[in-house]
Amino acid sequence: MYRNRLLAVAIVFFVSFFRFASADLAPQAEKTTVVNVIVRGEIDGGQVALVHRAMEKAIESKAAAFIVEIDTFGGLVDAAVQIRDMVADAPLNTICFVKNRAWSAGALIAIAHRHIAIAPGGSIGAAEPIPTTEKTVAALKAEFAATANKSGRDPRVAEAMVDKSLGYPGYAAPGQILALTDYQAVKVGYADVVAPDLEAVLAHFALAGAEVVTFSQTWQDKIVGFLANPTVRSILLTIAFLAILAEIKTAGLGVAALTGLAAAALFFAGQWLTGLGNWLEILLFLAGVGFIVAEMFIPGTGVLAFIGIICILGSFFLSLGANLAALNVLAVSLIAAFAIFLLLVRRLPSSRLWSRLILKDAETTQAGFVSAQDYSEYLGKEGVAKTMLRPAGVAEIGGIQLDVVSEGQFVPQGTKIKVVSVSGSRIVVRPVV
């Protein structure tokens, strides 16, 4: 009897032990993670940097969903296109929660998501570009239509948000730009659900209880937005170009070089922090600087400096997008830099490199150089036409044969003539009566 009890206790002990051990060894279910990024205010480079930072975290953590909570009247189209590309190409379940409104550039970002939720009283659309030209409307309309088609929505609705001449039956007459309210967006398939808050959005997409990691704009993002501003970038380019010209002129003071490098670093920083940087642009710029430095120390004719400038221009062109707009920005910055440089050039010391690039020698009158022979000494003298003047020909004056021209009439050979006018190398004669 005692043995049976002991055996029962042993069995219970081992069963409990193995249950405990198996519970410890069993893999723990990973908690579902959702990345939520809050985009409020003007769409600019700072918002691009914010979304890029949040997207990297979402991909790294293999988030169950990437939610952009948006409330904006619009902003820069190029910034919106950059966010649109990130969202549309993301290997994640993307959801846009239109908190209040997603107008203009915000509408493009919203329709790039696989799903859209909209808050009660929210709206989406009103994306007519400013300035409203045929070219800008056509380009943005195509961008909206392609984005809507990629996310499985009716492209005609997206086109009507940009081009008011189209209209959309039942929602906007031709001549009116299309903007959809919350219930209208659901009805035309531009929103999956009307949801009052993020919790309701998560519940609708079976993500209730998920761990939400929220990203909002920081002061670093605002600095990036400032650096990515087109006007600021143009100013930085002007400073960089001016510094290059000044360094070539002075070669060795170092102040211009440091200023140019700082401006270029800030220029490229805006690209890298928004996730759009490319090593090719940096390498081209550094190669260009290297060629210019080499020209300063290696005897030459300015070829290395020319190659260096081309490399630097190429790096900026690629960084700006390698398009017509990039050429415009480069042209404006170069013209501004040259204008400022011309104002400063007399105050800057000259370098050996500058001396090789710029011709300093001049053939002056004081040095005995003249632009043409002085024939004024023949004025009033007489001679003989050695050839027929028709009206130009050759005459002999003071024993010297000269090219002359009559006052318009033909003068036979052997006629006695007199010089009546001298202008430069032009000698005018008339027959002596």
Image (cartoon, grey):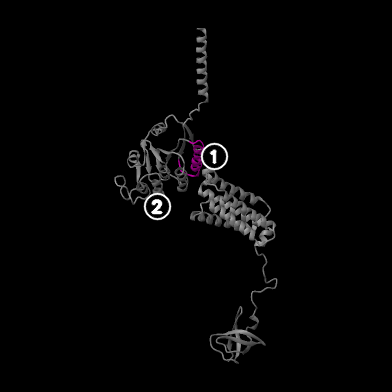
Cα gap from disc 2 to disc 1, whole angstroms: 33 Å
Q: Nearer the viewer, residue 405 or 163?
A: 163
Around disc 1, counting alpha carbons within 10 Å, would you say few (fewer than 14), some (14 to 19), or many (20 or more)? Answer: few
State the SS at label 1: helix
Say what amino acid the circle numbered 2 marks: Val
- The answer to whether residue 132 is visible is no
State the SS at label 2: helix
Residue placed furthest toward the left: 170
- Rendered position, 213 above or below 346: above
Task: Pick whichever of labels 2 and 1 is earlier in the sequence.
Answer: 2
413 inside magenta stretch:
no
Residue labelled with disc 1? 220
- Residue 310 lies left or right of residue 65; in this view the side is right
Q: Position of residue 222 (x, y in %)?
A: 52, 41
Residue at left offset 62%, top offset 53%: 287
Q: Quadrant of the C terminus?
A: bottom right
Residue labelled with disc 2? 137
Q: Position of residue 311 (x, y in %)?
A: 59, 55
Q: Position of residue 138 (x, y in %)?
A: 40, 53
Around disc 2, counting alpha carbons within 10 Å, would you say few (fewer than 14), some (14 to 19), or many (20 or more)? Answer: many
Q: Nearer the viewer, residue 179 or 416?
A: 179
Residue 314 occupies which quadrant of the picture? Answer: bottom right
- Residue 70 lies left or right of residue 271; in this view the side is left
Say what amino acid the circle numbered 1 marks: Gln
- Rendered position, 126 above or below 429: above
Q: Nearer the viewer, residue 193 or 421?
A: 193
Q: Position of residue 275 (x, y in %)?
A: 52, 44
- The answer to whether residue 141 is visible is yes
Q: How many marks?
A: 2
Magenta residues: mostly which secondary structure? Answer: helix
Number of the label disc, if any, that sits on residue 112: none
What segment carries the magenta color? Answer: 41-62
